[in-house]
Image (cartoon, helix red, strand yellow):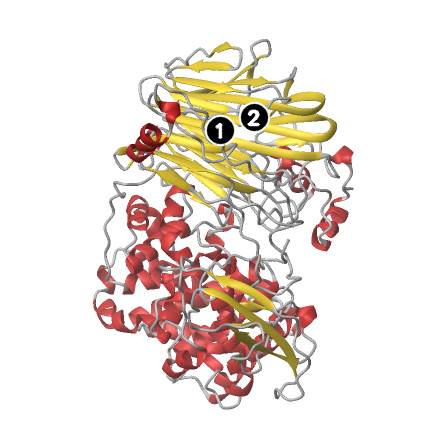
Amino acid sequence: MKKNFLPFRCYVPMLVLAVCWLGCPACSDEAVEPEPSVPQPETTYPDAYQDKERTQPYPKTSNELIVNPAPFLVPQAMKTGERLQYALSRTEDFADAEISEPQDGCMYNLHRALDAGTWYWRFRSTDAEGASPGAWSETYAFEVKAETPVFVTPPFEDFLENAPRVHPRLYCFLNPYIGEARQNVTSHPEYRQLTARASIALEADYGTMDLYADAETLRQHATWLYHAYYLLQDERYADKLVELLDAMLALPPTDTQLFTDNFTTSALTLAHAAVYDLLYGRLTATQRSGAEELMMRALRHSYQEQCGVEENHIFDNHFWQQNMRILTQAAFLLYDKAEYADEALPIFKYYYELWTARAPASGFNRDGIWHNGTGYFPANVKTLAYMPALFSYVARFDFLQHPWYRNAGRALAYTNPPDSKSTGFGDNSENGDQPNRLTAAFADYLARETGDAYAGWYAGECQSLVRQDYELRLYRMCSNRTYESALPEDAAKMVWYSDAGEVSMHSHLGNAGNDLALSFRSSTFGSGSHTTASQNAFNLLFKGHDVYRSTGYYQAFADAHNLMSYRHTRAHNTILVNGIGQPYSTEGYGSIVRALGGNHISYALGDASHAYCGISDDPMWVNYFAQAGITQTPDNGFGETPLTRYRRHVLMLHPRTVLIYDELEASEPVRWDWLLHSPVRFDINEAEQVLSTADEADGFYAVTQLFGSSEMDITQTDQFAVPPATGGAEYPNQWHLTASTDNQPATRYLTLIQVCEAGESPYIIRRDGDTFTCGDWTVEACLNASDSPRLVVRHHTEPVVFSYGEESPVIDGVPYLRQDANSSLLYDETDGEYQVMEMTDRAPIATRKGF
């Protein structure tokens, strides 16, 4: 299958008008038939854009590269020997082939940029020594574009040459600052927090503690004591670390205890590694040997499970959150020890190469946003900060130049603003009225290391939260770098995260008390893991508080409430088809295919036509459904649907109005359920199809008017399909509104949402056929599902125009010849001048097989 891709076009208005006057007789007194716009080919949809576990080699012709060079990835099933060898050529006959040494795992990094153009590659399996190679695979071609971001990490051999051979080394990147930091430590504003944490560990009695009942406590104690001794050189902390190590060595964990789960493995590994590294010179040979053997046990076990797997998995949560970082640290401590080097060095290399190939944020995301849901971003912060800090210092190359890091500060500002709830999606994203302390600490880290203006503003607004964080405290107390804290003056009102599949819109970013914020998701990553079945869903916040938001409570990863009333599509501001939602898989994907923005209008178009594609057949989810006693049947909201088209246009008409235009089609008559969720009850005027909610505590209310091509039945309930396991005042009921249109093969919805301060009055929406007037805005929306879709928005006093459809609009009194049929066109002010922006669908980036 092939996805149509037509380029973005941007025209300076004077040029557009000149073309109209000079080259288009339709603008003169003598009307001449203009050339017809270019029709768009019919959209086709692959089974998925991402594989949870890779099934086809990468890259291929159908894969747009994220960075240059791309990693070469081979599915585990296609590796038939101990190692893999790779061949790369500019010609299909491989006459000039560059052939790699045999590689462990299923990946290969070039560590050099490729010239633009077409390249060819293939691979073959070998034995451990590289002898007796098998047959070459088929040949795969891929294209390197000149505009692909270049990000070239040093080869591991160069990294290794610079790696330290002395201890302590885990925080060697702080060596340039540690002397000054120790001199000034007692006057640092976080000094008391540092010693308070360490004091908790000092009071622990490891002789009576059930050591392995809570490995995370041991990890924390080792971390706090390490930080305190590293800065203060107070022997009390060193003695306590030795006491902790002796307690663990006196009763080493059994395999059952050490490998009970992967977090326990890494936590116990860190508890040994911290003491071993910091006090290496004072430990006895027996103590060092005991710590080394525990670390090597963890590395052997984990590497055997991970090598070949992690490079081919879309995103293994625990591995990237914590385990990879700590296992890398263990390998970093053992790579030069004679007894363990033969084992530890290849493992160390694997983690270095894996970070290059698949980090950060899956390796297929340049946006700076967390593709796996904003709620779980804090769990990844320590790794996201530590790994580039270590690798950059040792390799003498800035790993923070990766496009994801360069965009991360802005992404934080737009998706999880200061003094506001998160606007994003995914597990745990609804919790908290302000950013997590780790999120704030990461912004501070980015600001110090990169000077990013958005990160600096964010950290400046969240200084009290930054100082609450203890995971990056050692870094902050050593780093003497400062940063500016002003929000960039050119901050846009909308940001499109095209790789991850989200859009953020803000009316007043930087002024939480007056900000209307909308987030919109339609992602090729699909749902599952820590994301939800929420393609083409939106969240709307005002003053940092929820107006309309996804509902349910994240109390467990996959209990009955989570599966039926939190993760399920019914919990989100999107639609159901015959009561059925989207599966929990990469196949249940959407895509944001267009986005345009100016000072008056922010616009995005999401396509979730493939998202309602059946049940969740991932063995993990099948098992969770069985554990919860839930069957994936239509009665429970799971199954096949005849949906063929679900395109949702979302516009913020600044500053306080939101417009949504839905195009829905199916191959047979269905029941369409349009969903809206609120923390408070809806006041429903069914005759006028007006829905109102009031947040009295925060001083605002919202009025939503819904228009459709067919009769709607509007209902609401405050009951969940399955209630949360834990109830009470902390988990109040939420309100779920459904507007149902029954027995229709196609329908259209137009929604206008006005958010008002208490005491303000909303505009009365006046309708004349398919024309709607709302304050300073006039909207023309074709609601007849038998006609071609059309949406035009104009401002009464500004020359702003948005146009979607086949007709060419009039802009500032002059006809504009649409370049492509059914394109989206915006004439709005950007950077101080008006310009025309026209866009057709952008093809999503695929990382799996061609289509």
Q: Nearer the viewer, residue 239 or 629?
A: 629
Q: Amino acid at mark 1?
A: Tyr
Which residue is tagged 2?
A: 789
Residue 59 at what x, y percent from top left?
A: 56, 63
Helix, strand or loop at label 2? It is loop
Q: Identify whether 356 is placed above or below 634.
A: below
Q: Residues within 10 Å of mark 1 (few under 14, many from 20)?
A: many
Q: Does the image show residue 722?
A: no
Picture quadrant where residue 515 is located: top left
Q: Indicate the secondary structure of the residue bearing disc 1.
A: strand
Give whichever of 59, 678 is nearer the camera.
59
Location of residue 54 by image quarter:
bottom right
Question: Badges 1 and 2: C-beta atoms under 8 Å apart?
Answer: yes
Determine the image quadrant of residue 126: bottom right
Q: Which residue is mark 1?
A: 804
Q: Position of residue 601 (x, y in %)?
A: 39, 29
Front one among 283 and 3: 3
Q: Disc 1 to disc 2, how far (Cα)?
A: 8 Å
Vertical arrangement, residue 517 with respect to residue 340, above or below: above
Q: Looking at the image, is mark 1 or mark 2 earlier in the sequence?
A: 2
**Left or right: 735 in relation to 467:** right
Residue name at image x 41 percent, y 44 percent? 435
Q: Is residue 405 left or right of residue 424?
A: left
Residue at screen point 54% across, 37% down: 606
Q: Position of residue 799 (x, y in %)?
A: 32, 23
Q: Residue at x 56, y 84 (%)?
A: 343
